Image: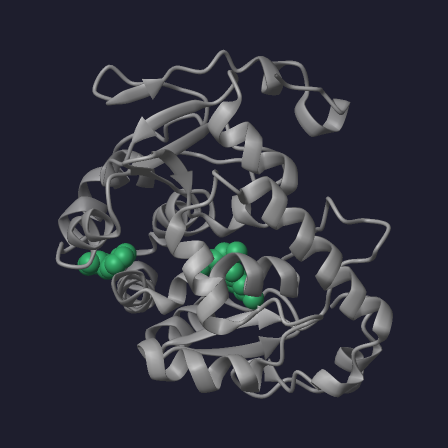
Amino acid sequence: MPVNDPVVAEQTPAEDHTIDQCWDRYTEEEHQVWTTLYERQMKVLKGRAAPEHFKGLELLNLNDGGIPNFDRINEKLYKLTGWQVVAVHGLIPNDVFFDHLANRRFVAGRFIRDADKLDYLPEPDIFHDVFGHVPLLTLPTFADYMQAYGEGGYKAIKHDTIENLTRLYWYTVEFGLINTPEGRRIYGAGIVSSQSESRFCLEGRSPNRIHFDLERIMRTDYRYDDFQQTYFVIDSYEELMESTANVDFTPIYERIKNLPDIPAHKVLPTDKVYHEGTQEYARAGGLAKQVEWV
Ligand SMILES: C[C@H](O)[C@H](O)[C@H]1CNc2nc(N)[nH]c(=O)c2N1
Ligand SMILES: N[C@@H](Cc1ccccc1)C(=O)O
Ligand SMILES: [Fe+2]
């Protein structure tokens, strides 16, 4: 529970962990943080984010000043792909999270980070969730992928393979890159909502950039508190959908259960490699050492 959000503290979440956004309770400062982050991100994402992200921002009109009202977003979003944004107080249990996604409800924190801590946050705030994740939910293929992912959660719970499925989410929904005729672009929300990682993931010498490979991704570790050491690239959202939604993961879960995890920095001989990274950033200590990367 974020300490700086008295409104959340007052509310007792419902069974499904949802709360009211209480949009009219945001302060001027909180609205200003959104606007500052929005303008800063739009500068760094120009030429770096996937065109579908910009299209989603426009369709949902997320830049008409200050923190967006979920009711306003949902009037538009529901008509486009049947998705809605619902407010939660923070991270919620896996099964509840999967259930929301399976029912086309994207859970978003209502709190926003402090003005003096624009770059680091311990858990997803409204800027990461709404600016980062929600725009792509306007794209039918990606909207379908997110719902199928949620449905896949039930199977992963049954097989005790949530970690493998979470890695798929991590390396696509959070940190995915996509090839476009104009070059490689960002679609992952974890990058889109980060000023520094938006440059690092595309232009940094340090990280690997490898083509999407489902089984390999589900075996690959990741960093949750620093830049990724490897980014996976798809050719299209349809490729992502076809490689996952219409594939029965049961045999894959059975197979990878007996295989070792792949370290986050590793490149395999079977990988389709766009760039083999130097890993100099991680080796030098990464964010912990405030390493400047090239
Ligand atoms: C499914 C997987 O465990 C993943 O980490 C979930 C857990 N709970 C969550 N809860 C919230 N609010 N937002 C999230 O992105 C997630 N991710
Ligand atoms: N097809 C996957 C479910 C899934 C769909 C889409 C994305 C991720 C997972 C399964 O059988 O478990
Ligand atoms: Fe996220």
The foreground one among 12 and 39 is 39
Q: Is residue 71 visible?
A: yes
Residue 154 in the image: above or below residue 12? above
Q: How many marks?
A: 0
The foreground one among 100 and 257 is 100
- Residue 2 in picture, x, y percent from top left: 77, 65
Q: Is residue 73 left or right of residue 21?
A: left
The foreground one among 259 and 194 is 194
- Residue 140 in picture, x, y percent from top left: 27, 67
Residue 132 in the image: above or below residue 258? below
Q: Is residue 216 left or right of residue 226?
A: left
Instruction: Report the residue at 79% width, 84% height from top.
Output: 25
Instruction: Report the residue at 45% width, 22% height from top.
Output: 265
- Residue 47 in picture, x, y percent from top left: 48, 38
Q: Is residue 134 visible?
A: no
Residue 294 in the image: above or below residue 38? above
Residue 13 in the image: above or below residue 259? below
